[in-house]
Image: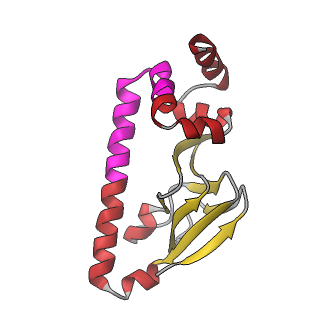
C-alpha cells in the first residue's frame, strides 16, 4: 500500500499550517515534532523505527498541520498516500482508529510524564525507557522535549553520573 522513500537528515516531512496528504512509517531514522511558542521552538515528541509519522489534523481532514515534523537522521520510510487509503473506506476508518488510538495513548503518557515527574524524573524516565534517544538526539533538543534549559539538563546529567 505504500512505497519506500529515503530522505536526508533535516528533511521537513510536514510544515505547520500545510494540508498534508501523506503518512509515513519509519523503518530507519528519527522524526522530531516541532511546535512554536512565540520565538521558541519546542520539541513535542520523537518518533523512531516502527512508529507512524504524520499530522493527525490532516488525517482527520480538519485543517493543516499544527506542527513541523523534521527528520533528525538520514531516514528510510514507507510513504502512504491518504488518497490510497481512502479507496477502501472500511480499511481507512480502521487505519484512522488505530492511528488515533496510538496518538491518544502517547498524549496521555505525555500528560502523566509532565504532570507527575520533575525535570530529573523526566530525564531518568527517558534514560531508562528510551535510552536510544539520548544516544541519537542532540542534547539541546532533548532539553526542549523535557521542558528544561540545556544548562538545567547538564546539571541533572552531572548529578546522576
Whether residue 140 is visible, yes or no, is: yes
Q: Quick check: 48 above or below 52?
A: above
Q: How many marks?
A: 0
Residue 158: x, y in percent? Answer: 63, 14
The residue lying furthest to the bottom in this view is 87
Q: Quick check: 134 above or below 18?
A: above
Residue 72: x, y in percent? Answer: 67, 51
Q: Quick check: 155 above or below 77?
A: above
Q: Would you say 140 lies left or right of 100 here? A: right
Whether residue 39 is visible, yes or no, is: no
Q: Would you say 6 lies left or right of 118 here? A: right
Q: Quick check: 124 above or below 100?
A: above
Q: Which residues are magenta?
A: 103-125
Report the predominant secondary structure element of the magenta stretch.
Answer: helix
Q: How is the image coloured?
A: secondary structure
Residue 49: x, y in percent? Answer: 53, 55
Amino acid at each position: 500500500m505504500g512505497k519506500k522513500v529515503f530522505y536526508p537528515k533535516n528533511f521537513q516531512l510536514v510544515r505547520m499550517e500545510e494540508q498534508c496528504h501523506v503518512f509515513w512509517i519509519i523503518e530507519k531514522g528519527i522524526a522530531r515534532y516541532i511546535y512554536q511558542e512565540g520565538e521558541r521552538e519546542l520539541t513535542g515528541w520523537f518518533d523512531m523505527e516502527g512508529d507512524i509519522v504524520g499530522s493527525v489534523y490532516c488525517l482527520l481532514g480538519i485543517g493543516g498541520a499544527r506542527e513541523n515534523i523534521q527528520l533528525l537522521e538520514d531516514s528510510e520510510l514507507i510513504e502512504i498516500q491518504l488518497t490510497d487509503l481512502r479507496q477502501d473506506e472500511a480499511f481507512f476508518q480502521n487505519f484512522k482508529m488505530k492511528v488515533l488510538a496510538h496518538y491518544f495513548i502517547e498524549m496521555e503518557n505525555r500528560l502523566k510524564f509532565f504532570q507527575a515527574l520533575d525535570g530529573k524524573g523526566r530525564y531518568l524516565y527517558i534514560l531508562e525507557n528510551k535510552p536510544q534517544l539520548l544516544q541519537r538526539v542532540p542534547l539541546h533538543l532533548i532539553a526542549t522535549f523535557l521542558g528544561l534549559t540545556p544548562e538545567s539538563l547538564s546539571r541533572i546529567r552531572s548529578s546522576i553520573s
